[in-house]
Image (cartoon, helix red, strand yellow):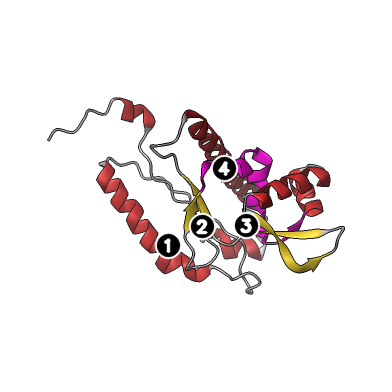
C-alpha cells in the first residue's frame, strides 16, 4: 500500500497506526506532506500559494500533521510570525492489516487513494510539460532520456510477486539510498520513482483456489 521512503538510508518506513492515521485524514494534509517531501522546507504561506488555500488553512493542517508526528518545525529558522516546516525524519507506510476494523480500512483506503492521486497528478503534469516543451531548452535534452513510464503485463503467484517486491527492496537499498541528501547538488532536481506491484482485482475475483 502507500509508502513514503525514509529520508535517510538507515531509517525504515514505519506502519501508521489508526490513531496516527487521523493526522492524514484530509486530502490537503496529504498534499502538504507531499510538497514538504519535495521541497524539504516550506512556510505555511508558501504552501498556501502552492495548494491554492489560505495560510490559515495550511497552518491548521500543519499543526495537525505535527501533532501526529508527520512534520516538524525547522530548528533555527523562521520567526514567531512565519515558521518553517519540514517532514519528520523516517518514512511511513499505510497497509491494510488483518486486524483492522471497517473504519480503519476505510480510512487507510482513503489516504492511499489520495496518495495515488498526488502521484498521478505529477505524471499528468510531466506529460503536459513534455508536450509543450521547447525542444531548444537545454533542460529538455538533459532529462529527455532520464524519464520512463512503463507497465509490465504478467501472470504471477502471490509468492512470486512477493519475491519481486523483496528484490525491489534490495534495489532501493543499493541504488536509491545513495541518492538521498543531494539537495543543492549541481544538476540535481527533485525526482520521484514509483514501483507498483498488485493483482488485477477483476481477475482476482475469478481466481480459483490453488490445488494442493
Label 1 – label 2 distance at C-alpha: 10 Å
- Which label belongs to residue 5? 2
Q: Residues within 10 Å of mark 4 (few under 14, many from 20)?
A: few
Element on which disc 4 rests: helix
Alpha carbon separation for disc pair 4 and 3: 22 Å
Kindly identify which residue carries mark 3.
37
124 to 177, vertically: above or below? above
Label 2: few (<14), some or many (≥20) within 10 Å?
some
Q: Magenta part of the protein: which range?
A: 16-43
Identify the secondary structure beneath mark 3: helix
Query: Looking at this view, is 174 or 96 the one in front?
Result: 96
What kind of element bears circle 1?
helix
Query: Is residue 3 visible from the viewing direction of this image?
Result: no
Q: Nearer the viewer, mark 4 or mark 1?
A: 4
User: Where is mark 1, residue-wise?
Assistant: 172
Name the side, left or right, on which 192 lies relative to 60: left
Amino acid at each position: 500500500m502507500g509508502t513514503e521512503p525514509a529520508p535517510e538510508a538507515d531509517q525504515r518506513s514505519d506502519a501508521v497506526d489508526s490513531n496516527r492515521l487521523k493526522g492524514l485524514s484530509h486530502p490537503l494534509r496529504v498534499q502538504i506532506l507531499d510538497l514538504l517531501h519535495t521541497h524539504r522546507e516550506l512556510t505555511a504561506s508558501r504552501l498556501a500559494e502552492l495548494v491554492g488555500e489560505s495560510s490559515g488553512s495550511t497552518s491548521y493542517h500543519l499543526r495537525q500533521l505535527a501533532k501526529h508526528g508527520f512534520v516538524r518545525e525547522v530548528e533555527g529558522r523562521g520567526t514567531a510570525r512565519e515558521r518553517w516546516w519540514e517532514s519528520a525524519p523516517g518514512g511511513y507506510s499505510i497497509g491494510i492489516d488483518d486486524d483492522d476494523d471497517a473504519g480503519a480500512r476505510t480510512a487507510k483506503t482513503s489516504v492511499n487513494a489520495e496518495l495515488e492521486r498526488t502521484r498521478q497528478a505529477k505524471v499528468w503534469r510531466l506529460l503536459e510539460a513534455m508536450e509543450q516543451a521547447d525542444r531548444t531548452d537545454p533542460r529538455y535534452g538533459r532529462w529527455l532520456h532520464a524519464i520512463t513510464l512503463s507497465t509490465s503485463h504478467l501472470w504471477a503467484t502471490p509468492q512470486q510477486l512477493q519475491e519481486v517486491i523483496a528484490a525491489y527492496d534490495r534495489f532501493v537499498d543499493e541504488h536509491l539510498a545513495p541518492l538521498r541528501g543531494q539537495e543543492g547538488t549541481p544538476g540535481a532536481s527533485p525526482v520521484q520513482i514509483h514501483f507498483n506491484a498488485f493483482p488485477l482485482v477483476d481477475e482476482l475475483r475469478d481466481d480459483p483456489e490453488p490445488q494442493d
